[in-house]
Amino acid sequence: MAGTCGRWQECRCGGGSAWAEVVAPGRLPAVVIVCGRREHVCRHCPRQPYRAPPYSTPSPPRGCRRPLAAPPCPKDASAPTTPIDLTTERPPKTSKRMSQPTPPTTTATTTALREWNRLIQHAAASGSYSRCLRHYASLLAAGLGGGGASTFPSLAKSCAALRLPRLGAAVHAHALLAGAASAVFVRTSLLDMYAKCGRLPDARRLFDEMPRPTLVSWNCMVAAYGRSSQVEESVAVFNAMRRAGVRPSEGTLVGVLSGCVDSVSASNPGMCVYGFSVKSGLDAGLPVLNSVLTMLVRGSHLDAARLLFDGICNKSVVTWTALASGYLLRGDYLEVFDLFNRMRGVGQNVDSVVLVNLISAAVLFGNLSVAKGVHALIIKLGFECEEDLAASLINLYAKCGDLESAREVFDAVHMANVVVWTSMISGYVEGGHLNEALVMFDSMVCANIEPNEATLSSVLSACAKLGSANLGKKVEEQAIATGLHSEPRVATGLIDMYSKFGSINLARKIFEGVTNRDIAVWSAMINGYACNGEGSEALVLFKEMKNKGFQPDGIAFTHVLTACNYSGLVDEGLECFHSMTMEYGIEPSIEHHMCMVDLLCKAGHFGSALKFFKQMPSEVQNKVLAPIISSYSARCADSSIDFIPEELLNLETQDSDHCVLMSNMLSCLGKWKKATSYRRQLSKQGLMKEPGWSCIELSG
C-alpha cells in the first residue's frame, strides 16, 4: 500500500482484512483481499483516503459486482486441537471442546497458527501448491489473521510455481499488513516470486529497497535477469554484488551463465564470468561446469564443449544431456547414439529428457528398425507411460512412415494431453492421411481437449491441402473461440489456407489483424501474393518487412523469387537473388536456383539460364533440370528452336519426370532414337511416371 510520500512498505491498513475464497469447478480458488476500512495510516504522511498499492491486489473474479467479504466464521474453526496429519488433503476436524461457542484463548490461537503454518509449509514443500493456497484461505476464514513471517515464503513459492503474479501481489500485500515484509527472507521469497512470474520491474524495486541484500537475494536477482536473457543487466548486478563485498557462490555463476548462451566470442560476458570462476576457484562445481557446457553447445562450439565434457569426472545426467543436445542441433545423430551407449556403459541413470534426445536422433536417422529398437528400450526402462515420450514416439513413427505403430502408441496412452493429440494429427497430415487428421481433430474436441497453436496449424494445413473452404472456416471459428486466431503460428496457417483458396483479401485481413508478426507471418503473406500472381504486391510487402526491421531468411527469399517467377519480373528477381547472397550472406538453396532458372527460361533468356546452370554445384544441377528441359521442350513444340545444347544431352538423370521431358523434347525435334533411349531407361530402371491429380470441393 502506498502513502502520499511513496513509502508504500511502511503503510498499514486501518481496518481488518480477509481472503474470500470463491470455488469454481476445475479452477484454483480466487483469493481477494477485502479491507474493512478505506483508509490507511503512514507515519510519513497525513491521513489520506485509501489508494491501491503499487503492487496491486487482484480484482474480484468475473461475475462479482463488488469485493467479496469472507463469510462469517464459526467460532469452532479457530484451531484444530488434534495433531495435524500432513499427508492428508484437508485439515482435520476440530474437537468437540473447540466447537463450543466460546472465543478461543490466546494459547489456543497461537497453537492453531503453528499447526496451520506447518500444514501450509508442508503443502508447498511437497509440491501441492494449490492446496497450500487453499489452506491459507481457510486460515484467514477462520479469523486467525494473516499468519506469521514463516508463512509467506511458502505462499510466494506456490504463486511462483503456479505463475500467478496477481495472487502473489495479494500475498505481498498481506505480508505488509502482517508486518512481515521487512524480514529479509520474506522479501527474498517475494522477489523470487515476482521474477519467476515475469514481473522483473517489481522484483528489481523490491531488491533496491533492501538495505543489506543477502547472498540469496543477490542470486535471485542475477538469476532473474539470466532467465529472461537480459545478459547486460545480469552481469551488472553480478558486478555490483562484487563491489558490495559479497562473495559470489556457485549459484551466482549459474544464474549469470544461464543468460549467456547465444555466443562464445571473446567479448561474450559468459566467457568472462567463466574466467572469474576459474580464478576464484569456483569452476570445479558440477552446476557451473554444466552451465558452461550448455553455453558452449548453444554457441555451436562442440569441439570445446567435448573437451570440457571429457574433463568432467563425476558427470550427471544433465552433463550428458547438454552435449547430446549439441550434437542434435548439428544433426549428428550417430554421436548421440554413441553418447547414449557410453552413458549406459558407465551406469548413469537415464531420464525422460535423455530418451527424448534419443528419439530425436532416431528421427534424424529415419530408420524404422532403429525406431522400434528405441521404443523397445523405452518400454524396458519403464518410461512408456510418460506423455512427452509418447508424443515423441508418435512423431518418430510418423517420420518413418509407420502410422499404424504411431496410432498404437497413441491408443496406449491412458489420458492423452494436447501434445500427444497434436503429434498424432500432425503425423496424419504429413503422411497424407488428411481425412484421418480431421477425424482425429473432431475426436479431440469431443474429448474436451483444447487445441493449441500447433494443433490448429496442422489442421489448417490439412484443410488447405484438401481444398475444403467449409472445413477451413470451421477450424478458424475454433481458433477464434480459443483466442488463438491472432497468434503467429495459427495466423500463418490461416493466411496460407485462404491464399490457396484464392481468397487473398481474407488472407490480408488476417495478416493485418496480427499485432505480433514474426518472419513466418510476413513470408506467408508474401507467398500468398506470389501464388495468386500478384508479384508487385509481394515485392511491396517484402520491402515493408525489411523497413520494419525484419531480416529475411531463406524461406522469405524463396517466396519473393517465386513471386517474381510467376509474374515475369526478371530484373527484380535477379536483384533479390544477388541481395540474398551479397547483402544477407544466405547460401542459395535448390529452391532458389530452381526459381531463378525457371524465371530466366520463361522470359526466353536461355543463354543466361544455361550460364546460370553451369555455375551451379554438380549435385544441384540434376535437381534444377526440369525448368530448363520444360522450356526447351515448349520451344521445340512451336518450332522456336531446332537444337538442344550439348550440356543437356550429356546429362544423365534418374528422375522419371526428367526422362519424360527429355523424350518429349527430342521427339519434337525428330530425334526418335535418342527419345526412345530415354523411354527404355524408364522401364529398365523401374522408374514410373506418376500421374498428376487435383481435387475441388463441390457445393462448397
Image (cartoon, rainbow, N blue to C red):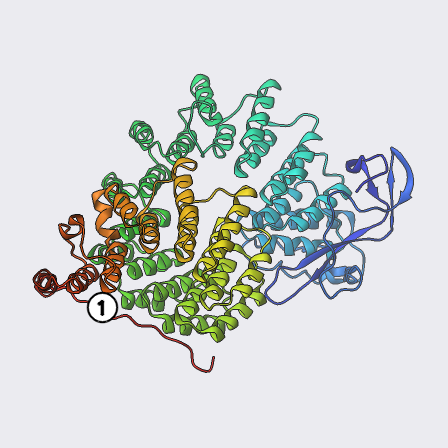
x%, y% of residue 345?
A: 22, 41
Q: Quadrant of residue 89?
A: bottom right
Q: In percent of the image, x 42 and y 24: which residue is there?
A: 283
Element class at badge 1 = loop
Q: Is residue 518 left or right of residue 168?
A: left
What amino acid type is highlighted by mark number 1? Answer: Glu
Relative to 601, residue 268 above or below: above
| Quadrant where the N terminus is found in the figure | top right
Q: Is residue 698 left or right of residue 594?
A: right
Nearest the eye: 408 or 78: 408
Nearest the eye: 356 or 528: 528
Q: Quadrant of residue 366?
A: bottom left
Residue that lies at the very extreme toward the right in this rendered image: 46
Q: In percent of the image, x 65 and y 60: which residue is there?
A: 29
x%, y% of residue 595?
A: 34, 52
Relative to 595, residue 615 above or below: above
| Residue topped by disc 1 | 690
Relative to 437, residue 129 above or below: above
x%, y% of residue 640?
A: 25, 59
Q: In percent of the image, x 70 and y 60: which residue is there?
A: 21
Nearest the eye: 245 or 195: 195
